[in-house]
Image (spheres, helix red, strand yellow):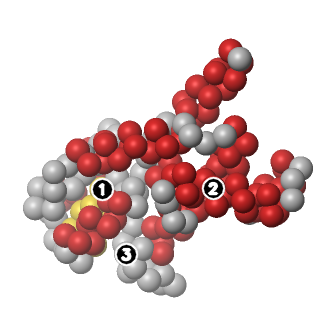
Amino acid sequence: LLDLFMPDTIGFEGLLELRTQSPRLPIVIVSGLEDKRIVREALAYGIAGFIPKSARKPELAEAIRQVMEGSVYVPEAYATNPGSSALSSQGDLVRRLKTLTPQQLRVLQMIRQGLLNKQIGHELGVEQTTVKSHVSEILRKLDLYSRTKVVIEVAKIDFDAILAETASKKDQV
């Protein structure tokens, strides 16, 4: 459970930091800010739920139960066509991920692990400029604007299955 107003963070900084460190961790925002725009933006960052601080105990318990079962919880008042755009955007992301080269997929996997360009270069035995080139190309192909956004979006899908599929295709060649 995460409050958007915590010491040493402004807005979604805490969420982005948690998402970067633990991309698969289900995060539920509990907030006194009951604004649909905030809920939509938080959902875009991959939260597992949003609970207004005005929620009663039974609603809080139900929200946590749904999230623990793998659902995304948003009160009806904030729901806007739940899931439809998320599912189509996930399909688009999977399609775009499949355009990455094997080396770009390795770089992406290391980005997900939180490695810096220097560390990725050392692991792969390439120069930092080569890693930067791969990162730029990953961002371009995935149509995303930052490493953090890549981690957030890729956490919404089964990236390991895509890696396995790519590896099996490589073995067949």
Q: Which residue is mark 2?
A: 137
Q: Earlier in the sequence, mark 1 or mark 3?
A: 3
Q: Is residue 144 visible?
A: yes
Q: Earlier in the sequence, mark 3 or mark 2?
A: 3
Q: Which residue is mark 3?
A: 4
The location of residue 23, given as percent across then percent down, is: 53, 53
Task: Tell me the amino acid under the disc marked 2.
Answer: Glu
Quarter of the image containing the N terminus? bottom left
Residue at 69% from the left image edge and 23% from the top image edge: 170
Vertical placement of residue 34 versus 166, above or below: below
Q: Is residue 57 left or right of residue 127?
A: left
Residue at 51% from the left image edge and 52% from the top image edge: 142
Task: Decide: few, some or many residues near mark 2? Use Cα within 10 Å; few <14, some 14-19, many ≥20.
Answer: some
Task: Tell me the amino acid under the disc marked 1.
Answer: Gly
The Cα–Cα distance between marks 3 and 2, rounded to whole angstroms, is 32 Å
Task: Decide: few, some or many residues near mark 3? Use Cα within 10 Å; few <14, some 14-19, many ≥20.
Answer: some
